[in-house]
Amino acid sequence: MATETSDAPLAVHAVKGVLNYFEMIRRDIDSVRERDPAARSTLEIFLVYSGLHAIWVHRITHWLWKRNVKLPARMLSQTARWLTGIEIHPGATIGSGFFIDHGMGVVIGETAEVGADVTIYHGVTLGGTSLNKGKRHPTLGDRVVVGAGAKVLGNITIGSDTLIGANSVVLSNVPSHSTVVGIPGKVVRRRKVDENDALSHQNLPDPTMDLLQQLSRRIEALEKRGRKAPARKKKG
């Protein structure tokens, strides 16, 4: 009787864990439907979205990693990498509603932390800049969007509701509600990005071009002043 009593909480815990896992799958599928206009049906999303497959395998490997079953976790994550082209270390912490669009070439390091409802695109790296075994990968807040090819490196924090432009290289902390572009990444706008504008990379500010235009206007103004200035009389 004592054994049956002690086994009951374990069974309940296992059932709750399975139910939570399937609830996360449902939330992940919903996130794709909300953020990918190419998604046509739940069945299509379930079968062909490699980003979701990588995330679902990661949730299993992360569970194993936290229970110190590390070699099987690494082997399973490598299998997912071979199948999907997406590498997520089992130690990484991933929030709900995470969406990897296209996905090929995505790398997420061991100590990375990703908040809820984050979207990243192919070629993104959440990498480290240190050989220390402690926290060495970035932390992303909720609802962050990371454009294709962007690199977010080191133990830095990206605030919630931030947009990182494609191919940017971010090396320092970014406050919430920011837009970041460039190499190295610079904050070029501080306001919450509208969900409909999050993918409008063609409308992102270009600080280098803005500076060149300012210089061009300044040179033009100086030239006009020079033409209007009276000519100096030659001595002698």
Image (spheres, helix red, strand yellow):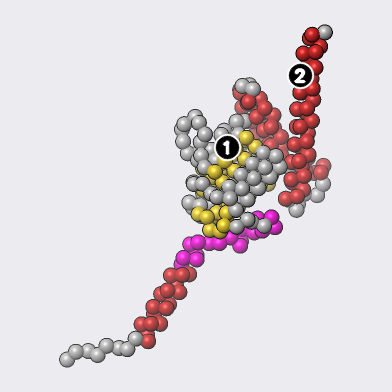
| Amino acid on which disc 2 is placed | Leu
Q: Nearer the viewer, residue 212 or 157?
A: 157
- Is 203 included in the stretch rendered in magenta? yes
The mark closer to the camera, 1 or 2, is: 2
For residue 3, side relative to residue 184 (left or right): right
In the rendered view, would you say 145 is above or below 92?
below
- For the N terminus, the quadrant is top right
Q: Determine which quarter of the picture holds residue 226.
A: bottom left
Q: Residues within 10 Å of mark 2 (few under 14, many from 20)?
A: few
**In the rendering, at what x and y percent does residue 186 appear?**
50, 54
Q: Residue furthest top?
A: 1
Q: Residues within 10 Å of mark 1 (few under 14, many from 20)?
A: many
**In the rendering, at what x and y percent does residue 114 appear?**
62, 40
For residue 65, side relative to residue 19 (left or right): left
Q: Nearer the viewer, residue 228 or 6?
A: 6
**In the rendering, at what x and y percent does residue 7 appear?**
78, 14
- For the C terminus, the quadrant is bottom left
**In the rendering, at what x and y percent does residue 213 appear?**
48, 69
- Is 166 included in the stretch rendered in magenta? no
Instruction: Give the Cα separation between the discs numbered 1 and 2.
Output: 30 Å
Q: Which residue is mark 2?
A: 10
Q: Which residue is mark 1?
A: 112
Magenta part of the chain: 195-212
Q: What predominant SS class does the magenta segment belong to?
A: helix
